[in-house]
Amino acid sequence: MMPESDGFPTKNRPCILLQGQKLSNPEEIPLSMVGTGTKCQKGGQPIPLVCPGCGTEISLGTCSCGHVECPTCWSTWAHRGSQRMAGRVWGYQEASGTRHVPRHITFDLDTLDWDKAKAKVLALGFTGGVLVPHPWRIRPECKKEINDIASKTHQHRYNVVRGLPDWRAAVYYSPHYHAIAYGKGIPLEKNSDSYVYKVIRKIPTLEDAQALAFYLLSHTHIPTSSRKATYRHFGVCTSQKLKPTRTFKRTDVVKCPGCGKAMVFPGTNLCKEFKVLVQEGWILIAKSRRKSKTRLPIVPVIISPPAAAVVPCFYAEPLQIVQTSPG
C-alpha cells in the first residue's frame, strides 16, 4: 500500500516546485510534476467533425488550454515540445550526413544543474543531442502497486502517479537526466558494480525520437519561469551550431480517414484547420579559423541540399480520433 505523506522527512523527501525558485537541494525547494496543477475550464471538451463526402463522423481529441500544469491539457504542451526536440536532433543527422542514429541514455547527478549536466554528458563521450531533467523516481515500496494499476488501465505508470490524491507520497527526490544523444560514449567495464551511465536503446527514426521526447516530458518538472526550459540541446545540436535554412508555418486541415476529404464542423462548411511550423534544410554552422583580435564571424556551411534535409517540426495539437462511425 502506498504511504501517505509524512511531513516531508529529511531522507527521500517528496518535492514540489514553486514558480521562480532555483532547482538545487530538495531540503531548500519544493518541486512539482507536469500536469499536477489546477485544471482549466476549457479542457476535456471533444471537437466533433463530419465528412461532407461520405458522412463519417469523428471526435478529435479535446479543446486544450495547452498549459504545462493543467492535468487535462499538459499533453498538448508536451506534444509541441517533443516535436521541437526531435526535429532539431534529427536535423543534425540530415545536416551532417551521418549514418549513426542517436541513443537514449540516462545518468545521475547530485542536483539539477544544466551546466553540470551538459559538462557530464559531453565528458561521457556524447557529442550532441537534447537533455531532459527528472527530479524523481518512484518509491520502491510503491512500484508494484503502481505497475499493476498501469497494466490494468493501459496507462504509463507516471500517469498513474499523476492521478493519485497525493502523488508526492509515491516518489522521492533522485535527480537524474535523460538524453537523446549522438556518440558512442566512453567504454564501460563489464560486470562492474559502479554506475556511470546507461544506454537504454538506439533511436532509429524521427517518429521514435518524437515519441521518446513526449514520454520524457510527461514526468519532468514544471518550468520555474518563462525563461527556464525543461529541456535543452547541447553540443552539435545547439542553435549556435545547427539551424534550419527555411522556417515557415503551414495551414493544414483534418482529412477524413475514409475518403480523404477535408472534415468540417457539423452543420457548417468550415474546415478544422491547424497551424504547423515546418523547419527544413538543416545546416551546420562553422566558425572561421582565421586569426583576428575581433570576434570571429559565424559562417554557415551547407552540408547537404535543403531539399534532401526536410525535418518537419510540428507545433499543432496531436490529432487523436476518439471515435469513428461510418456514414
Image: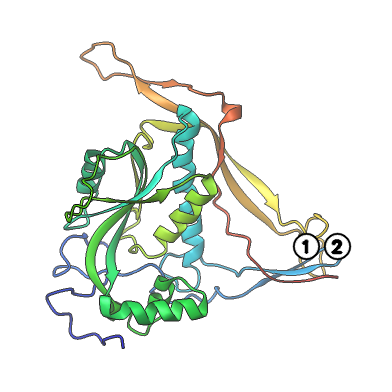
Residue reaching furthest right?
A: 53
* Residue annotated with mark 2: 52
Q: Which quadrant: the N terminus?
A: bottom left
x, y percentage for residue 119? 21, 42
Q: Secondary structure at mark 2?
A: loop
Say few, some or many: other residues with alpha carbon within 10 Å of mark 1 (under 14 / 14 to 19 / 20 or more): many
Q: For residue 18, say whether it is visible.
A: no
Q: Secondary structure at mark 1?
A: loop
Mark 1: amino acid = Val
Say few, some or many: other residues with alpha carbon within 10 Å of mark 2 (under 14 / 14 to 19 / 20 or more): some
Number of marks drawn = 2
Relative depth, front residue between 311 and 225: 311
Between disc 2 and disc 1, whose residue precedes?
A: 2
Residue 152 placement, left or right of 143: right
x, y percentage for residue 26? 17, 68
Is residue 256 positioned above or below 103 on the image? Answer: below
Q: For residue 26, say whether it is visible.
A: yes
* Residue annotated with mark 1: 264
Picture quadrant of residue 269: bottom right
Residue reaching furthest left?
A: 10
Name the residue at 52% across, 75% down: 154
Mark 2: amino acid = Pro
